[in-house]
Image: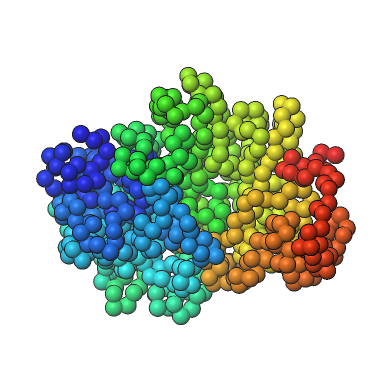
Amino acid sequence: MSKFLPMSRQEMEERKIEQMDFVYVTGDAYVDHPSFGAAIICRLLESRGYQVGVIAQPDWKDPDSIRIFGEPRLAFLVSAGNMDSMVNHYTVAKKRRRQDAYSPGGKMGLRPDRAVIVYGNLIRRSYKHTPIILGGIEASLRRLAHYDYWENKLRRSVLLDSGADLISYGMGEHSVVEIAEALEAGIPVKDLTYLPGTVFRTDSLESLENPCVLPSYSEMQKEPLAYARSFAVQYRNTDPFHGRILAEDYGTQGYVVQNPPSLPLTQLEMDDVYGLPYQRTWHPRYDKEGGIPAFSEIKFSLTSNRGCFGGCNFCALTFHQGRILQTRSHESLIEEAATFTRDPDFKGYIHDVGGPTANFRQPSCEKQLKKGVCPQRQCLFPKPCPNLKADHRDYVQLLRKLRVVPGVKKVFIRSGIRFDYVLADKDKTFLSELVRHHISGQLRVAPEHVSDIVLSYMGKPCHQVYEKFLLEYSRENEKTGKKQYAVPYFMSSHPGCTMREAVKLAEYIRDLGFMPEQVQDFYPTPSTLSTCMYYTGVHPLTMEKVYVPKAPHEKAIQRALIQFRNPANAELVREGLKMAGREDLIGYGPKCLIRPEKEEKRAASKATAGAEKPKKTGKRKTIRNIHKKKKA
């Protein structure tokens, strides 16, 4: 008998299951690993005695595809998968992606756009009265009215469009168990209006205790600033300790009501979740397609924490995992690392030990686990809070223990560190050991930009902080005698970034002496503060106006400026410099970004005529030139 959860009627019968308690429908392939939300929720319910079947990537055009197990006794659970289906399918330029890393063989097209809506309606057509519970990141971040970048309009809660009864938002372990227990006790799903971490629909607010009524959907459709005001209220109510009940009016369709978030998991609960009997690989049915590409990224990685108090405005973690740090114990992580060494594919390298932010291993201050996070201030932005407890000792001890696990050769950190948090820690042991043991040649960091104006709209520290980190990082490398470099990630077209700010970033890259291989054009995804700015043109927490680069051509120029050395970008770069009034950067001087247009045409003409290519007179600049001038 397979140790995987049933995916077919045959597997169900092999287990002698007459009726499933829950059927989990997901847009991802079934990978039985705790990095996949479906596996966590299904294994958790199984551990509580429920029979659970998985329908992975059903044919949404065929109702029979969700009838595999028949009607579940308690409910259908529905998720788009580990990614929002629209982000999974489309680039920021709204072009169709070629591969889906969460599908067998990377095949695209195995899940629909807006998957939770499509799956919900597919189920409802066959099962009129069976409870449907939405979960996962797509439902979580679309639980109330939200701006949809792909349709360029405000969309209503997916609860209404999907035909579902409830949304379990956030990470879901607490709320899904409470939902299961309530349904098992015979409580009708329409009466499940009291559970933290859930969203429901109701015709009246009379039974609710002091709800906060948000602007109505019709009001927000007419006036984007109303959405900005609504978002600000939502943003300040993402904490389980002081979050209020939020209600959104949909006229004749009643209200969509969001209960406060679930409490964060304790360390014991985290250990229990990650210690469930996962098979830690994909279901064997995917072997013939070569497996699931996304699994290779996490197969030998360790998740040590959840939540993030970093507060980046372009990130949706505040609305999904929350700002309170939750961690696994050293024992739990070491035990998982030991399982790696028994895998024949393991070569001795643990690829990552982290989470949303690798070097967060405790709440930012002592009060958070009892009183929650501050609704009116951030932990690290614009400067570290006086109450911030910047301490890497626990993380350092964990990494030291992992390094000596028999069979482990090297432990890498790849999920990203907060360099401002590193600087806030007066003890430099972590930075020293990071340089000595946990990177190989390059440290990837995300300053995102160099303009303090843009950084303030991103919720990131000022550029001077990044420069200070680079100096300390360089000193630590000099102590070891290693030549290791910081590889920065930059973002173009974020709200607040004018063409002059984009040119400023290009000049900084010029001075570094390399061309970034990867550039992230700002992607307005649901339920981020930056997306609200993009849609409304104002900062929702201050209501001040914000410049927003929206035109595709302008966005292309900003992106091209970051990669100005690419000959294919020459025309866009030249246009951007003229728009910014920086023609001084067009010419032959050492500070110029690009040659005059006539010189480009002349060079192109010679190349076309078959002219001999000039001999190289010097070594190509690479990332190894970074900070060379600063050292000098």
Percent x, y of residue 185:
15, 49
Residues 308 and 523: in front is 523
Percent x, y of residue 527:
47, 61
Percent x, y of residue 326:
44, 40
4 horizontally vs 511: left or right:
left
17 horizontally vs 543: left or right:
left
Residue extending furthest toward the bottom: 222
Q: Say which quarter of the image contains residue 49.
A: top left
Which quadrant of the rendered structure holds the N terminus?
top left
Residue extending furthest toward the front: 610
Can you see residue 508? no
Q: Which residue is rendered at x = 52% and y = 55% of the image?
A: 315
Q: Which residue is rendered at x = 52% and y = 47% of the image?
A: 309
Can you see residue 7? yes
In this view, 465 is above or below 231: above
In this view, 325 is above or below 133: above
219 horizontally vs 256: left or right:
right
Residues 93 and 370: in front is 93
Which quadrant of the rendered structure holds the C terminus?
top right
Percent x, y of residue 153:
46, 73
Residues 393 and 274: in front is 274
Please say which color scheme the image uses: rainbow
Q: Which residue is rendered at x = 31% and y = 68% of the image?
A: 160
Residues 405 and 616: in front is 616
Q: Which residue is rendered at x = 16% and y = 55% of the image?
A: 71
Q: Say which quarter of the image contains residue 608.
A: bottom right
Q: Say which quarter of the image contains residue 599.
A: bottom right
In this view, 492 is above or below 614: below
